[in-house]
């Protein structure tokens, strides 16, 4: 194959890939929507309803024992499927209100997101936190307002709430007709197509009716005169007072197209997915410390954004999740692990369907592959064929909750250290050791991660421990260009300084007020809420 042919083939593969995540507040319907997307892509044949416990069916994206027992998602997973000729890489993130920074970090590995809102609750606290991470990278967002077959807020009220709360422009590409038991479907403004809410067929498809604009008399026949007139009025209002869809604004994360539907009934999902594959960006360029890497470059490169231990309890394995950033991955190829300055031959890469995996022969930018990790790969590690590259934009986030670890059996101290080290490397929890003393202090973005840590310590490392509260309320990594100033800071604050699992210095404060006061007293010290993985 000539160079021109290889370049053309690579460009084709890149352009047909969509790597995305789904964000939502708990109970907004994220897991149900995920299952319906997989169903539509033919990846699964039966949606594992999250509430269908008696049939022993679990969501395909939930694989940890805790997830199956509690019916919640507490870790992120990767799923690959095909839709309309596009290769879809879906990075599923936890929807529980208390999750780990793993949730945040996964959002740095996607090119776009789908935001799910409950039509009765609107924008909720967790959605705001996830939006902050999306805004850091100007991530394009499509909004799906769920549960329209239940009564909730008026559509215009929801649009206003999204704009005022999340500071992003809204553009409805579909408009609902009624809600609750009066919900009749949606009107696609772009295609001038009526989607009727009724009993779905065997494939989960609802009836679509292509009409000749809003003046088509069939609209009155199908909806009735009153609902048809309401729809005409609402659409005219949107056209006169609303904003037009702008591809550049959407891809810059400043405008969100909005769809309405019911994930449970699989209504509106296909309409949203059809538009998503058409407007969502293909794999985007990725920054490194030296330059920006284009996905269309022929040389292979990739970055590890997630480590997961013990996905297969039978083998006690550790898997590194690598996003391909450029070029073409081929089974058996030799790449450079730049942090260790070692060449590595990758023979056993995997692609995923949650915990199920299969070998992969080739992969392209946007694809997520798993590499067996024997303790040598860390989050943020970069791999490439030739040029030494160090990808950026894979951060750690300052924890918001803290606990002290107490070991039930002192003879298991070595196993505790090993377990906490591995769990911290995969981002499940952050581990701090004081400059003075031998305590383990755990830090997490959400308190559920403490339960996850204890469960996994017992199940995977045979370590029984318990936790107690601490006086810490905030953490920041500290740096200073002036070694004398840093030494003075260390000497004055020995009792509040810790090292994390990577050996980086961190300051733990008893309150936000105390943290702000410390920052005022030591202006030469940089207090960082995020830390790049290098």
Image (cartoon, rainbow, N blue to C red):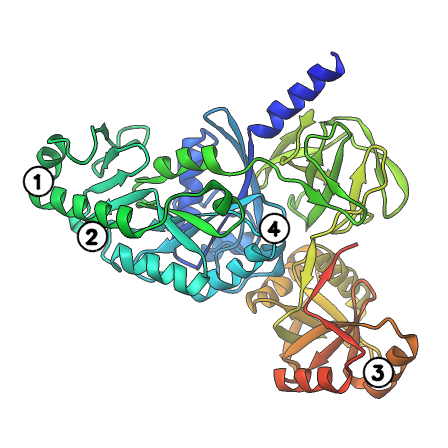
Q: Is residue 448 above or below residue 116?
A: below
Residues at marks 4 and 3, CA–CA distance in whole angstroms: 34 Å
Above or below: residue 153 compared with residue 354: below
Q: Earlier in the sequence, mark 4 or mark 2?
A: 4
Question: In what element is the residue under mark 3?
Answer: helix
Looking at marks 4 and 1 on the same chain, the residue that comes earlier in the sequence is marked by 4
Q: CA distance from mark 1 to mark 2?
A: 17 Å
* Residue density around tag 3, few if under 14, some if 14–19, many if 20 or more, within 10 Å: some
* Mark 4 to mark 1 CA distance (whole Å): 46 Å
Q: Which disc is residue 114 wearing?
A: none
Instruction: Classify 10 Å Cα crowding around label 1: few (below 14), some (14-19), many (20 and above).
Output: few
Q: Residue at x 52, y 65 (%)?
A: 98
- Please give the residue where the numbered disc 2 appears in the rendered image: 180
- Mark 1 and mark 2 lie on one chain; the one further toward the N terminus is 2
The residue lying toward the viewer, choosing from 476 and 15, is: 15
**What numbered label is drawn on residue 106?**
4
* Residue 80 placement (x, y as % from top left): 55, 34
Dots 1, 3 in contact, CB < 8 A: no
Instruction: From the viewer's perspective, tell me whether residue 463 is left or right of residue 249.
Output: right
């Amino acid at each position: 194959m000539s160079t021109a042919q290889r370049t053309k083939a690579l460009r084709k593969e890149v352009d047909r890939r969509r790597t995305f995540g789904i964000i939502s507040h708990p109970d907004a319907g994220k897991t149900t929507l995920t299952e319906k997307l997989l169903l539509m892509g033919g990846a699964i044949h039966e949606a594992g309803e999250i509430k269908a416990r008696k049939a022993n069916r679990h969501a395909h994206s939930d694989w940890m024992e805790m997830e199956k027992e509690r019916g919640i998602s507490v870790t992120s997973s990767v799923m690959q499927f095909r839709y309309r000729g596009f290769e879809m890489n879906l990075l599923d993130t936890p929807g529980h209100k208390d999750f780990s920074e793993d949730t945040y970090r996964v959002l740095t590995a996607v090119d776009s997101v789908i935001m799910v809102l409950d039509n009765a609750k609107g924008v909720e606290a967790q959605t705001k936190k996830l939006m902050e991470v999306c805004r850091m990278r100007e991530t394009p967002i499509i909004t799906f307002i769920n549960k329209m077959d239940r009564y909730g807020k008026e559509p215009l009220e929801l649009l206003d709430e999204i704009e005022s709360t999340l500071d992003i422009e809204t553009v409805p590409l579909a408009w609902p007709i009624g809600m609750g038991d009066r919900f009749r479907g949606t009107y696609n403004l772009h295609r001038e197509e009526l989607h009727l809410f009724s009993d779905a067929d065997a494939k989960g498809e609802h009836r679509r009716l292509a009409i000749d604009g809003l003046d088509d008399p069939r609209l009155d026949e199908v909806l009735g005169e009153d609902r048809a007139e309401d729809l005409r009025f609402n659409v005219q209002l949107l056209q006169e007072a609303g904003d037009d869809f702008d591809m550049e604004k959407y891809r810059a994360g400043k405008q969100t197209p909005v769809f309405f539907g019911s994930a449970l009934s699989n209504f509106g999902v296909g309409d949203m997915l059809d538009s998503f594959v058409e407007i969502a960006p293909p794999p985007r360029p990725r920054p490194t410390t030296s330059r920006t890497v284009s996905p269309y470059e022929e040389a292979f490169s990739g970055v590890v954004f997630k480590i997961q231990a013990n996905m297969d309890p039978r083998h006690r394995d550790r898997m590194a999740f690598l996003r391909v950033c450029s070029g073409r991955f081929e089974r058996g190829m030799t790449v450079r692990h730049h942090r260790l300055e070692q060449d590595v031959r990758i023979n056993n890469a995997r692609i995923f369907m949650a915990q199920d995996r299969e070998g992969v022969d080739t992969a392209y930018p946007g694809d997520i592959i798993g590499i067996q990790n024997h303790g040598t790969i860390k989050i943020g590690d970069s791999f490439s064929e030739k040029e030494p590259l160090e990808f950026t934009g894979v951060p750690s986030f300052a924890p918001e909750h803290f606990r002290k670890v107490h070991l039930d059996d002192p003879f298991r101290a070595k196993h505790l250290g090993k377990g906490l080290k591995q769990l911290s490397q995969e981002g499940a929890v952050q581990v701090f050791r004081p400059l003075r003393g031998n305590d383990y202090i755990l830090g997490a973005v959400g308190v559920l991660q403490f339960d996850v840590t204890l469960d996994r310590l017992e199940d995977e490392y045979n370590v029984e421990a318990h936790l107690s509260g601490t006086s810490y309320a905030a953490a920041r990594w500290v740096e200073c260009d002036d070694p004398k100033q840093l030494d003075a800071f260390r000497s004055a604050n020995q009792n509040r300084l810790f090292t994390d699992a990577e050996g980086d210095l961190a300051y733990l404060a008893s309150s936000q007020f105390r943290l702000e006061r410390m920052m005022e007293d030591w202006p030469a010290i940089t207090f960082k809420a995020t830390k790049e993985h290098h």
